[in-house]
Amino acid sequence: MSSANMSLVKIKITLDSDKAPEPQPESGEHILVQVVPLVDLHETLLEYSEKDGYMVDARLMHLSIGISG
């Protein structure tokens, strides 16, 4: 057993096809938006995880591992 908590929220959002959502970083936070094809997601995250000053969220990394098979 684990004491970890996880919530799943599923929402449907309709956006104009030419508009991407804009990040709203908190104070001291830097968010880089980069669109990557799913087939390249894992390799791209690995490249970022090896760069100084970059940190990849573990949940996103695990998702990319699952997608890459």
Image: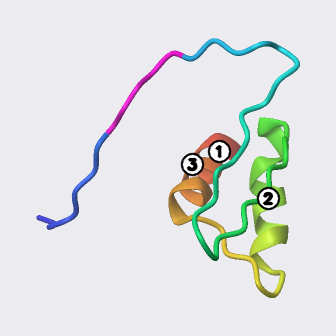
Q: Main secondary structure of the magenta part?
A: loop
Q: Please tell me which of labels 2 and 3 falls first in the chain.
A: 2
Q: Quadrant of residue 2?
A: bottom left
Disc number lying in front (2 or 3): 2
- On the image, the x and y values in percent for residue 33 come to 80, 50
Residue at 85 percent across and 69 percent down: it is 47
How far apart are the two marked residues, 1 and 2, measured between alpha carbons?
Answer: 26 Å
Label placed on residue 69: 1
| Along the viewing direction, whichever of 47 and 13 lies nearer the viewer | 13
Residue under circle 2?
32
Q: Residues within 10 Å of mark 1 (few under 14, many from 20)?
A: few
Q: Please tell me which of labels 1 and 3 falls first in the chain.
A: 3
The magenta segment: 8-12
> SS at mark 1?
loop
- Is 45 inside the magenta-drawn segment? no
Q: Residues within 10 Å of mark 3 (few under 14, many from 20)?
A: few
How far apart are the two marked residues, 1 and 3, measured between alpha carbons?
Answer: 10 Å
- On the image, the x and y values in percent for residue 17 come to 82, 14
Q: How many marks?
A: 3
> SS at mark 3?
helix
Q: Please tell me which of labels 1 and 2 falls first in the chain.
A: 2
